[in-house]
Image (cartoon, rainbow, N blue to C red):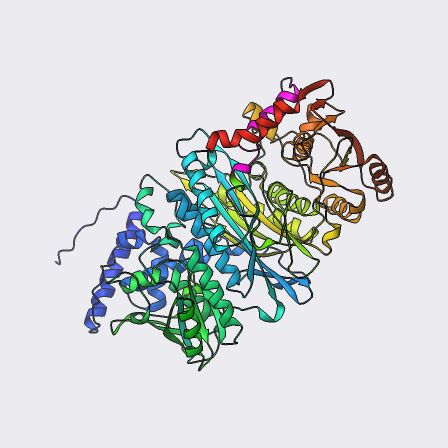
Amino acid sequence: MNNYPVILVKSSQELKNWALRILIFHLLLIDSARGNKVMSEPRITTEVIERHGLKPNEFKKILDLIGRPPTFTELGIFSAMWNEHCSYKSSKKWLRMLHSKGSQVICGPGENAGVVDIGDNQAVVFKMESHNHPSYIEPYQGAATGIGGILRDVFTMGARPIAVMNSLSFGEVKHPKTKQLVNGVVAGIGGYGNCFGVPTVGGETRFHAAYNGNCLVNAFAAGLADHDKIFYSAASGVGMKVVYVGAKTGRDGVGGATMASAEFDEFIEEKRPNVQIGDPFTEKRLMEACQELMATGAIISIQDMGAAGLTCSAVEMGDKGGLGIKLDLNKVPTREPGMSAYEMMLSESQERMLMVLNTGSESKAELIFDKWDLDFSVVGETIEEDRFIIFHNNEVKADLPLKALSGDAPEYDRAWSSTSKPKALEQLPPVNPIEGLKKLIASSNYSSKHWIWEQYDSEVQANTICSSGFPAGVVKVPNTNKALAFTSDVTPRYVKANPKEGGKQAVAEAYRNLTAVGATPLASTDNLNFGNPEKPEIMGQFVEAIQGITEAVKVLNMPIVSGNVSLYNETDGHAILPTPTIGAVGIIHNIDNMIKGKVKNEYIAVLVGETVGELGQSALLAEMFDREDGEVPKVNLEKERKNGEFIRSHIDLIEACTDCSDGGLALAIFEMATQSNLGFNLFESDISFIFGEDQGRYLVGCSLDKANKLIDESVKNDVHTEIVGGFIEGKIQIGRYNSSINELSPLYKNSFENSFGK
């Protein structure tokens, strides 16, 4: 009788692992028998597979696809292309339902950025993306390279960046890591964006215990391009040269995409080498060199090297063009000696591009990049066969079916469960409205963020009309009388309590913020930040949020044209609040008609939209009572659209405008008054009326004569309006309660800096 080892297993998972080990062993024997050369690379074990973020079933699929064990480099390539960050394997099914069509859309999801028509043969190119995991590990560089990456997504398309924004979520103020994160992230955003020379015109910052172990850094960028000067990533033509340009390749960021597709644990600090290092001055030169080459007609396709670096850029170019790619890594410019094929293929060193050039244009291109002191190297060519072939030191390090890396990536239909209804709203104790307002304006969530935005250059390029502190940032379109408005919005506590309504509300608030400056909403980008999708309750948040977003962008004509999904935002099993951030763009056809004024003494405060007094999940509950109970405010999309159209069609009667969202009417009128160094008088002191967060509402400031005309027009248009107070000097009056502006204004202006200033 033959003596076979007895293997004792304790679980089905362990059985699967043993089966995988045996399969690998047998395949290696077969390979050896065939006389295949064994490469001098690490052995592929179940532990190595696991460290690459691949499940046993995914590794088996690799074996089935290529009919042999992968080399170490091939394993790294599959790991990069099949991780959550690059393949969207848990979200693809649901992303397909997002509404992305419209007469204004030139290019929707699938390219580096979305492209939307703004008339006169011009287009706005924009996208939002996350850099959450790197920013938690190394705040300055994580945030800085997040800005660098989103800028490359825009100028890769041929657009010149004109604006950036950011959406930041941090843990509790008292958490020992929060101050370091806030300071590092803000410095990184400012350090990169300011040096590159693009204005930061808006954003949002929030704090909540759910982000203690996993901050969110979402970066948005927008640029301008002519319709006939937009560049895409699809390679074309067989035998065309594949060209590497930009900075040299180093070991920074190796495995970054895989890290971004995993939860954090107690070994988080070990992941620091996965964070890239950015250089904004190199990025600026790279943009100028690319734009100069674009003008020559030499470029067939272009792709920035972002997540998964050279691997992802090459695969995407080949896949979209239906071609194979062959690369010689000995021709890749490196800044560190002895780099392996694995390292070069997975490095996420910044400020690099991959191009396919027209035949005979290489010399011309090289001269341009040499002028800008950037590396230029022909590193490969397009081939007819569906192969991704990598040579290094005259050895084949990878030979894979190219389409399999992209099109055959796993796609999961994750189990999901609907979010249960939140706890019913309990009765509030008596609240002094002045004390409630004080609590809001002294909190890190709602106090002035001037300490942040003053670190950003909002005036560079000299086209900024409105920036942080306004409902939306506004940038003039050069050499025209048009302007573009930008905003970023989401209320995560709404999404947690009711993901569908929360998703709708994020879009609706973006719609209102654009409207409040007189802009017509055009389109949106999304950054969908959630926890572990393998948990049904988390996947349910994702699914229902998408359902709400889809419904809202259809009704409000704000199609999603680009975006990003960031999952596994958890630490030790504790998930972030679901945070599907909406970045939206609107157009002001004539800047003479935008709303950018301030209120004056004796101006009237007019509330547009109906108020029931919805306090569920409100800012007042959270900040004053540390409570998150009650139903979220319902979003009536038809009324949102109607009220927005009313505001935009009566701009001549409106001096100042803001939407009513977090903090309700009380916070809206306080912010409007403070911006003009005034106080205010609110006639009503009912807590649900002044702090309720009913949707679809705007606060308008104007003269008495214009206020009366506006109300007359609202009757004709079946839009609810009412005079709720006015603007006065020196004091704050809410019903019979009062305070001095000299008491409240410093509280609002200084609280944030007192918490986070150095």
| Residue 493 as seen in the image, left or right of residue 45 | right
Verify whether residue 433 appears in magenta: yes
Please tell me how many numbered marks the rendered image carries.
0
| Residue 721 as seen in the image, left or right of residue 231 | right
Of the pair 559 and 229, the residue shown nearer to us: 229
Q: Is residue 364 above or below residue 723?
A: below
Residue 117, given in percent of the width and then of the height, sits at 66, 62
Q: Quadrant of residue 745?
A: top right
Verify whether residue 137 appears in magenta: no
Confirm whether residue 318 shows in the render: yes
Q: Residue furthest bottom?
A: 360
- Residue at the spot 84% in from the left edge and 44% down from the top edge: 717
Q: Quadrant of residue 508?
A: top right
Q: Which residues are magenta?
A: 427-451
- Residue at the spot 73% in from the left edge and 55% down from the top edge: 590
Residue 659, given in percent of the width and then of the height, sits at 69, 39
Residue 202, given in percent of the width and then of the height, sits at 58, 45
The quadrant of the picture occupied by the N terminus is bottom left
Confirm whether residue 70 shows in the render: no
| Residue 21 as seen in the image, left or right of residue 469 | left
Residue 435, given in percent of the width and then of the height, sits at 62, 21
Q: Is residue 533 above or below residue 121?
A: above
The quadrant of the picture occupied by the C terminus is top left
